[in-house]
Amino acid sequence: MNWLRSLLLPRQGSAYAGNVDNLFMFIVFLSVFFFTIVAGLIIWSVIRYRRKPGRKTPHITDHLGLELTWSIAPLVLVMGVFFWGVRNYMQAQVAPNEALEITVTAKKWVWAFEYPDGTRTLNEVHLPVNKPVRFIMTSEDVIHDFYVPEMRVKMDIVPNRYTELWFQPTTEGLYRLTCAEYCGKGHSDMMGKVYVDNGQKYQKWVEEGGDEWKTMPPLEYGKLLWESKGCSTCHSLDGTRMQGGGPSWRGIFGRMEKMGDGKEFMVDENYLRESILVPSAKVVAGYENIMPVFQGLLREREISALIQFIKAQK
Ligand code: CUA
């Protein structure tokens, strides 16, 4: 039955995925089984009792045995599904004590992660294989939803409160994290990467601060960051102003700009740096102060790569 499961469902990335899939497949088979019986009986009756000259339709008022059977059998099956579901649900709720705890802050339209040792990442999270991990999540603006299909976990993230979920990854690899609650125009870009690494690789990542792009030239790295850190949802490269977004990066470097109060300034390295880290410091007239704060979320090399990339957009 594994081929059928892999046809219907994403690959299994966690121990929990097996539980979910077994119940899912059981319900699928149950439905197919009873659909066949019911549809078969209907077709058979239509043919068997079709109108024929001289035939009288039999008149049956009741059949106690039959009625009890089709009441009690579904009850037993549905109760079975119920308790199976409750067991799975409980498993999804209670994380083991030794779980690695990662804080998740969702905001339009990025995922920010913080590890117990203070390591912070944006739109990507690295996990050790076969270790339970618990995510404690909150939102800075609207409702988002943390969804990793391959782990079979999904939970709403609500402003002003914490929600959580946990899973234990069982297979190394790269998994997809998406937002499953419509949260504005950047919703479909609100994606992240979940890397499940073996112990050694994970340890190396922790020690090196997770910079896998160390050898990349700054311009390439800047482009990658533009895409992966969520800049591309608001800042175009072709000069168009994105709806509800910020200024295009094309030709922005070296330009004189005005703030709402009429003060002028030049877009140079220092202005870009300040605007990336604390966007509210100088907002260009005609734009809203809606960009998330990146202070503490970007490494020095990432900031300078971004600035170089912006400079190159002539
Ligand atoms: Cu966040 Cu949709």
Image (tube, helix red, strand yellow):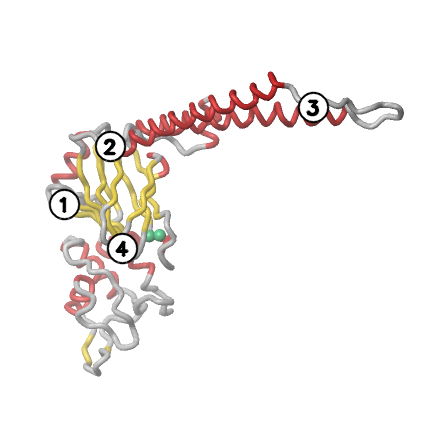
Q: Position of residue 270 (x, y in %)?
A: 14, 68
Q: Quadrant of residue 79?
A: top left
Point out which mark residue 255 bears: none
Which residue carries the number 2 mark? 94
Mark 1 residue type: Thr
Please tell me which residue is depicted at 66% across the width and 24% down the height of the picture.
40
Q: Is residue 280 visible?
A: yes
Which residue carries the number 3 mark? 61
Mark 4 residue type: Lys
Above or below, 259 against 39 in this view is below
Q: Earlier in the sequence, mark 2 or mark 3?
A: 3
| Secondary element at tag 1 | loop
Which residue carries the number 4 mark? 107
Q: Earlier in the sequence, mark 4 or mark 3?
A: 3
Query: Real-space Cα distance between discs 2 and 3?
Result: 52 Å
Query: Real-space Cα distance between discs 2 and 4?
Result: 26 Å
Query: Real-space Cα distance between discs 2 and 1?
Result: 25 Å
Q: Earlier in the sequence, mark 3 or mark 1?
A: 3
Q: Residue furthest bottom?
A: 262
